[in-house]
Image (tube, rainbow, N blue to C red):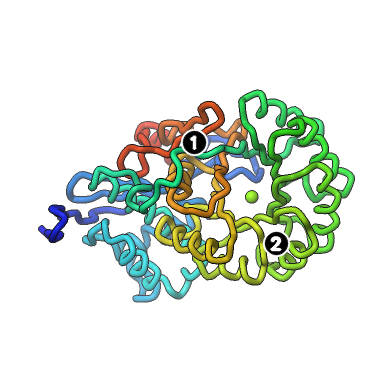
Amino acid sequence: MASHKGTGLTSDLKITSVEAMYLRLPQVKEQCDSGQDALVVKITTDAGITGYGEVDSNPMGAKGIIEGPFSHTATTGLGHVLIGEDPLQTEYLWHKMYRANIYGGRRGVAIHAMSGIDLALWDIKGKALGLPVWKLLGGGFTKSLRPYASSLFGETPAETGDRARRFVDQGFTAVKFGWDPMGRDEATDIALVREARAGLGTQPDLMIDAGLVFDAKTAIQRAKAFEQYNPFWFEEPLLPDDYHGYAKLSAASSLRIAAGEEESERKSFIELMDVGQVDVIQVDLTRCGGFTEAMKIASLAADRGIPVVNHGFTTYLNVAAALHFLASIPNTLGLLEFVVEEGTTLRHHITEPIRAVDGRVAVPDAPGLGLGIDEKGIAKYRVG
Ligand SMILES: [Mg+2]
């Protein structure tokens, strides 16, 4: 048993298993909605404390990276390097995982996989110490955040307007629409934004997520055309590697340009900020490298005067992680992405739901991520 001098704290926790559980709705639509399946990470310890995290990525690719065997000292299953380790040593374990996958894991799916593990480790740390993650991160900047309803565009501009009215009726003060059919043609693009604004009325904030469909010059033209509908931000109009295009767009437009959900690991965020010159950084806790990396990304953004928001379109594990993270950094916009996509319900069967009450979502106060897990629901939808 290790004794931590001066704290009165003892820890004899050891990681005994790392499992990646692939859940999937029986029917999935081929649309841009990552709420139809989920990869949930479960880490168990010898003291009976279990932690949960989530990975939003190519699910079977991430599962292989987590559960794969030792192959080579520079490419090893992440679970393999964690077994027997103390789960409270989150910084050390992050670097151990990174080093063990240096061939294929400096960006992308292996960092995504590490994210789910890191969230589960912080969940264990909180449960072991009886504290919510936000307190372990030294936070407490806020007790709640303002959720924005996050949805795909309707199939038509008119349907987008109908959705907007429904979200306002549900009490949301900010709404985001994204992806298809944006990018089909100029008239449709403008009509989508016009009807979204018409449905919302003048007061609520409107975010537009283009979904990677434009080149820089087209994005500049669209940003100009959308200005009259007063969008709060214009998200991901360009392909993620087009950092120079982002810089041109950002310089040319008065709209806030938002991006970051495609980035993983802090150095790719540095590129997005320093080359891309974007105005809002979107950090997905289930992709960026978990809490351990997200705190560094937020700090790098703060040094540049850039606000941070979350990205999350999957389960309440992602939402809970975002709440703890955003409550622990100074440079937020006070906003929380909150999926309201209608028809994909898997998130309701993994944990207890997180709800918006009176236009706010509370930061969890229970130990760890602070979410009740629905083991039966997980078993029911598990396919891998
Ligand atoms: Mg987006």
Which residue is drawn at the image coordinates 69% and 35% (left, top)? 204
Instruction: Tell me the distance, in whole angstroms, between the alpha carbons under discs 1 and 2.
Output: 28 Å
Q: Residue at x 82, y 47 (%)?
A: 226
Q: Secondary structure at mark 1?
A: helix
Identify which residue, 137 or 14, lies in the foreground: 137
Residue corresponding to mark 1 = 347
What SS does tag 2 mark? loop
> Which tag, 1 or 2, sits closer to the chain's start?
2
In this picture, residue 208 sits left or right of residue 305: right
Q: Position of residue 119 (x, y in %)?
A: 38, 52
Q: Residue under circle 2?
A: 239
The N terminus lies in quadrant: bottom left
Residue 271 place in picture, x, y as percent: 60, 70
| Res. 372 image quadrant | top left
Q: Residue 83 at what x, y percent from top left?
A: 25, 60
| Residue 383 in sight here | no
Q: Bin the neighbour count of mark 1 within 10 Å (Cα to Cα): few under 14, some 14-19, many 20 and up.
A: many
Left/right placement of residue 28 relative to residue 235 reads left
Tell me which amino acid carries mark 2: Leu
Q: Residue furthest right?
A: 187
- Place residue 80 in its image quadrant: bottom left
Q: Residue at x 80, y 50 (%)?
A: 183
218 shown above or below 143: below
x, y percentage for residue 101?
A: 41, 70
Dot 1 amino acid type: Arg
Name the residue: 52% across, 30% down. Answer: 356
Few, some or many residues within 10 Å of mark 2 (<14, 14–19, 20+): some
